[in-house]
Image (cartoon, rainbow, N blue to C red):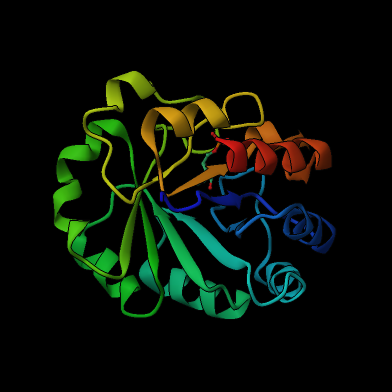
Amino acid sequence: MSERVRVKVCGTTSVHDAVMSAEAGADAVGFIFAPVSRRLVSPQVAREAGLSVGVTVARVGVFLNQGLDEVLRTAEAARVSAVQLHGELSSLYVEQVAAYYPVLRVLSPAELAGADVWRAHPGVTLMLDAPQPGGGVPLDWDALRAVFPVGAWLAGGLGPQNVAAAITALRPAAVDGVSRLESSPGVKDAEAVREFVRQARAG
Ligand SMILES: O=C(O)c1ccccc1N[C@@H]1O[C@H](COP(=O)(O)O)[C@@H](O)[C@H]1O
């Protein structure tokens, strides 16, 4: 029997949306701490939102090319349970974060050649995403079929209309979405979130 696909709803900026995502059945909510993001949230709000989702929902802090100190300080202040790392980062940097938090290391398809180093690392899970995170652009699933790493998570333009097809194509361990789950940047569309979870469970 294949394992159930986990669902992460990212870009949470309020207690209201965190609770709504948890009630919709999300396994994880994401908080984006990259200053460039239109979904930037403060560690204080993320902490309050994370405390409101109960014990079974993971709280993921998302970072893009930020310094190690900043990542660890922000993650601690927000009380996240895992850290998602985007950007051009050394293996040493990723290992240093993984000494404190389970890590989702995000790679674009062009970076997959460097994925091998993480396959045997118990604290690091791979996520495949588009080169522009949060851009709502799906990956070319057909091109990835033969190379998608077992156990990896999938992001990139996933929403209620395409998540089941993505799961069928690549059998990721989890799916993650932002742009297609919003009514405006940083504000969730509750019906889109509910349908995203429903479709992912059906996929
Ligand atoms: O969404 C952002 O603004 C963002 C900024 C910096 C790093 C990551 C960001 N989001 C991540 O992008 C993917 C998928 O987004 P989308 O569904 O294609 O819009 C997801 O992993 C987010 O965590």
**Rendered position, 34 above or below 193:** below
| Quarter of the view holding residue 69 | bottom left
Q: Residue 198's spot in the image, x, y percent? A: 69, 40
In the shown orientation, is residue 42 left or right of residue 16? left
Q: Quadrant of residue 148?
A: top left
Image coords of residue 111 (percent x, y): 23, 38
Q: How many marks?
A: 0
- Up the image or down, 202 lies above or below 120; here it is above
Q: Residue at x 67, y 44 (%)?
A: 197
User: Residue at horizontal 60%, vertical 59%?
Assistant: 27
| Nearer the observer, 50 or 86 | 50
What's the residue at 60%, 79% (across, down)? 77
Position of 114 compared to 173: left or right? left
Q: Quadrant of the C terminus?
A: top right
Q: Residue furthest front?
A: 1
Instruction: Report x, y in % for residue 116.
Output: 14, 50
Q: Position of residue 186 (x, y in %)?
A: 73, 45
In this view of the protein, which residue sits in the foreground, 52 or 83?
Answer: 52
Q: Specify the quarter for ligand 1.
A: top right
